[in-house]
Structures are given as structure tokens and as C-alpha cells.
Image (spheres, helix red, strand yellow):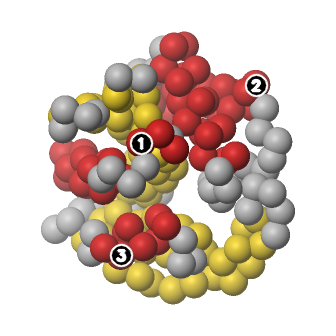
Amino acid sequence: MAADTGAWKIRRLDALDEPQIDQLADVLIDCVEGGASVGFMLPLTRERAIGFWRKIARGVAEGDRAILVAEDAGGICGTVQLVLDLPENQPHRADLVKMLVHSRARRKGLGAALMRSAEDVARTCGRTLLVLDAVTAGDAARLYESLGWKRVGDVPDFALFPQGGRCSTTYYYRDLA
């Protein structure tokens, strides 16, 4: 599965190599340094970012996750994952996680393109329900709502921003059936 706009190309990877892990670390660090609450606190060292992506690489290789990357002339500029390894009573569902867009590629439609591509991959994997969470009233939440994701509710003080300070999280779902 691949999508190409001329500005970037989106494709699903079946494995991650070290150069891809290095580029994904760049994207993660850029997002966290930009204030994205995606599970990491500042300062996010390169070693920690690479360690995270190596762990994800193992899940991709084992088929527990699907990962999509967007590439532009500068390399990987965005990514999104589907967690497929869920309990046996949830074979129809996937969690959409770590939708990240490098600052050089923001506000150009890449986030929406990654989301549509992830939905297509989910269908290919036989998934009919997707679930995700985002910082309440943040840029990502606005994107998801504009794409038709249904808001379930908010959890106050759910996580911390990377620089500190609590943030609420909003849960969303998308019925693909």
C-alpha cells in the first residue's frame, strides 16, 4: 500500500532497518521538542528515541504492529502505527498510535493523508474499528474530528506535556465497517 502526492510518498513497511530507525528518531525528537505529548518527557535523548523505535521494529517484524511512513525529499517526515496485537476478544479492532509529522511537513495535508492510509491498512488487515487518543483540543484532536472520527470523551489530567504540566486526553473511534 502506497500513496504518492508528489510532495511525499506514504508506504507501509514490513520491517525497519537502522537508517529508517534513525530517521524515525529524528521525527520523534522533533515532535517532542515541539511540545507533542506522545509518551516522552524532555529532554528526549537520541539514544532513548532510537531504543523506542528498535522496540517498535520488533513488533512490526512479529506482525503485532503495522507501521506507515511518509517520505519527502529529506527522508522520513511522518509516521503512524496500528497496534494489531490485541486480546482475542477484539480481533476486529486496532489502536491507532504515534501519528507523528515532522515540523518541516506540517500544515500541508500530510497528517490527513497518513490517517486515510492507516484506515486503508486497517481494512486490509480485517479491522473494522479503530481507537485513538489525543490531547484534548490540540491540533491532532482537531484533525481527527475534521476527518470524521467520533469523540467518546475526555480524561482530565491523563498525561504530561513533554516540558511538564498536565494535559487532558480525548478518546476517539472510527467505524470502518
3D distance between C-alphas at marks 2 and 3: 34 Å
Expressed as whole percent of the image width and height from the top left, the position of residue 130 reads 35, 63
Q: Quadrant of residue 3?
A: top left
Q: According to the image, label 3 marks what residue? A: 145
Q: Which residue is drawn at 46% across and 71% down?
A: 141
**CA separation, marks 1 and 2?**
24 Å
Secondary element under disc 1, as helix, strand or loop, is: helix
Query: Identity of the amino acid at label 2?
Result: Glu
Quadrant of the image containing the N terminus? top left
Q: Quadrant of the C terminus?
A: bottom left
Task: Answer above or below: position of 83 versus 53.
Answer: below
Q: Is residue 110 left or right of residue 99?
A: left
Whether residues under marks 2 and 3 lie with C-beta atoms below 8 angstroms apart, the answer is: no
Question: Residue 47 shows which numbered tag?
Answer: 2
Does residue 73 show up? yes
Q: What residue type is labelled 1?
A: Ala
Q: State the image coordinates of residue 33 (x, y, percent, origin top left).
A: 70, 46
Three-letter amino acid code at disc 3?
Answer: Glu
Q: Residue at x 69, y 83 (%)?
A: 156
Q: How crowded is mark 1: few (under 14 residues within 10 Å), some or many (20 or more)?
A: some
The residue closer to the viewer here, 142 or 118, is 142
Q: Which residue: 82% across, 42% down?
A: 43
Q: Name the residue under label 1.
A: 105
Badge 3 or badge 1: first in the primary sequence: 1
Mark 2 or 3, nearer chain start: 2
